Image (spheres, grey):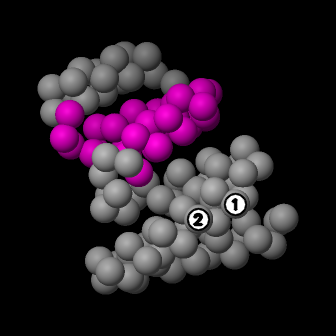
Amino acid sequence: MNNDRIQQLIRFVQEEPHDPFNVYALAMEYMTNQPERARAYFDQLLTEHPAYLATYYHAAALYAEQGNTDRATELYEQGMALAKAQNNQKTLLELQRAKQAMEDDF
C-alpha cells in the first residue's frame, strides 16, 4: 500500500467526486492491506455508479474472500447482466469464470 498514492487518490476523489475511476483506484489500493476499507469504496461505487462495470469483478471477489458468497454471487450476476447490456463479452466471460471458480471452491 502506497500512502502517497492513497493521498493523491483521495485528493482526486475530492476534486472530481463524480468520476468513478478515482474511487475504484482507491478501493484497489486498499485491497491487500485494508480489505474492509476497500469494500466500503466498492460499496460506494455500487451505490453511486452502478454502471461502472469494473467494480463488480473485484467487489465480488472481495466478498467471496471474506466468506460472504451470497453477496459475491449477487454481484457476479449483476455484473454479468451489466456486461451483457454493455455488450462487453470479455468482461462477461471473466465474471462467469470467476463465479464458477468461487462455486467450485465452496
Crowd band around label 2 with a 10 angstrom C-alpha radius: few (<14), some (14–19), many (20+): some
Where is residue 103 shown, x and y percent of the image? 76, 71
Q: Does residue 52 appear left or right of residue 67 in this picture?
A: left
- Residue 38 - label: none
Q: Which residues are magenta?
A: 17-46
Q: Give the residue drawn at x 34%, y 38%.
A: 23
Q: Give the residue drawn at x 59%, y 65%.
A: 74
Q: Does residue 79 appear left or right of residue 70 in this picture?
A: left
| In-front residue for pair 77/104 | 77
Crowd band around label 1 with a 10 angstrom C-alpha radius: few (<14), some (14–19), many (20+): few
Where is residue 80 shown, x and y percent of the image? 47, 75
Where is residue 75 shown, x and y percent of the image? 54, 62
Q: Are marks 2 and 1 in contact (CB under 8 Å)?
A: yes
Of helix, strand and loop, which one carries label 1? Answer: helix
Is 36 magenta? The answer is yes
Of helix, strand and loop, which one carries label 2? Answer: helix
Q: Quick check: 30 above or below 62?
A: above
Q: Give the residue drawn at x 44%, y 37%.
A: 41
Q: Is residue 55 visible?
A: yes
Pointer 1 residue: 70
Is 59 magenta? The answer is no
- Give the residue type at disc 2: Glu
Considering the image in quadrants, where does the C terminus appear?
bottom right
- Residue 74 - label: 2
Where is residue 69 shown, x and y percent of the image? 72, 58
Most frequent secondary structure within the magenta stretch: helix
Residue 81 sits in quarter: bottom left
Q: CA distance from mark 2 to mark 1?
A: 6 Å
Q: Is residue 25 visible?
A: no
- Give the residue type at disc 1: Asp
